[in-house]
Image (tube, rainbow, N blue to C red):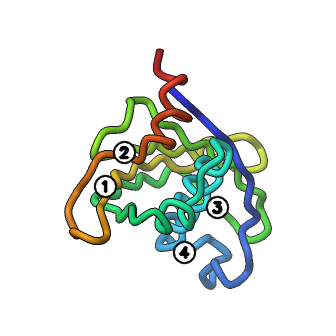
């Protein structure tokens, strides 16, 4: 299992009239967590796409527990709890600045060969970096 945390502050433009973060923005926060987790492993989407592999989202789930408010610093904990294959599953926990759990979510992404437009196995260099967390 591998987990990583990153922080992001709720911006004014991400909120509704009540000052709550708009529900559609949670998926973007999941992406921030996912991208920063991959970066922490020495990987990034641009490098993967340059090798001809993309990672589209196949599935997304989101459960709201408490609202996030304008100017709160949100901690995004992103976890991979199973060794990736053709699919990679991410779990997310979002905490407010009082360290209260406010949201949980999950996404499933698929490794896709861009030339063939077909699912494929993860790149070898990615598996080398992530495999050590699953022994």
Crowd class of label 4 (few under 14; some 14 to 19; many from 20; radius 10 Å): some
Does 99 sit left or right of 116 as displayed?
A: right
Q: Is residue 118 left or right of residue 132?
A: left
| Quadrant of res 101 | top right
Task: Measuring from the top left, give residue 23's x and y in whole percent.
Answer: 49, 70
What residue do we see at 56% from left, 67% from top? 46
* SS state under label 1: strand
What residue would you read off at disc 2?
88
Per the rendering, the mark at residue 68 is: 3
The earlier-in-sequence mark between 3 and 4 is 4
The residue indicated by pointer 4 is 22
User: What is the spatial separation of the Cα atoms under label 1 and label 4, in whole angstroms?
Assistant: 27 Å
Distance Cα–Cα, label 3 vs label 4: 9 Å
The vertical placement of 117 against 78, above or below, is below
Task: Sort mark 1 into few (<14), some (14-19) or many (20+) by Cα contacts within 10 Å.
Answer: many
Q: Could you say which is closer to the camera, residue 10 or residue 128?
A: 128
- Rendered image: mark on residue 110: 1
Q: Earlier in the sequence, mark 3 or mark 1?
A: 3
1 vs 4, front mark: 1
Dot placed on the residue nearer the N-terminal end, 2 or 4: 4
Q: Tell me what residue is drawn at x 40 percent, y 66 percent.
A: 52
- Cα–Cα span, label 2 and label 1: 6 Å
How many numbered tags mark residues here? Answer: 4
First in residue order: circle 1 vs circle 4: 4
């Amino acid at each position: 299992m591998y987990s990583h945390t990153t922080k992001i502050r709720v911006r004014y433009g991400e909120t509704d009239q009540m000052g709550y973060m708009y529900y559609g923005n949670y998926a973007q926060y999941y992406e921030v967590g996912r991208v920063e987790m991959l970066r922490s492993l020495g990987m990034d989407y641009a490098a993967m796409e340059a090798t001809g592999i993309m990672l589209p989202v196949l599935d997304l789930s989101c459960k709201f527990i408490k609202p996030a408010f304008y100017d709160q610093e949100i901690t995004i904990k992103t976890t991979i709890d199973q060794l990736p294959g053709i699919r990679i599953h991410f779990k997310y926990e979002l905490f407010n600045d009082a360290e209260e759990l406010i949201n949980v979510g999950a996404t499933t992404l698929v490794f896709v060969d861009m030339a063939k437009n077909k699912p494929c196995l993860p790149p070898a260099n990615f598996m080398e970096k992530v495999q050590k967390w699953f022994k």
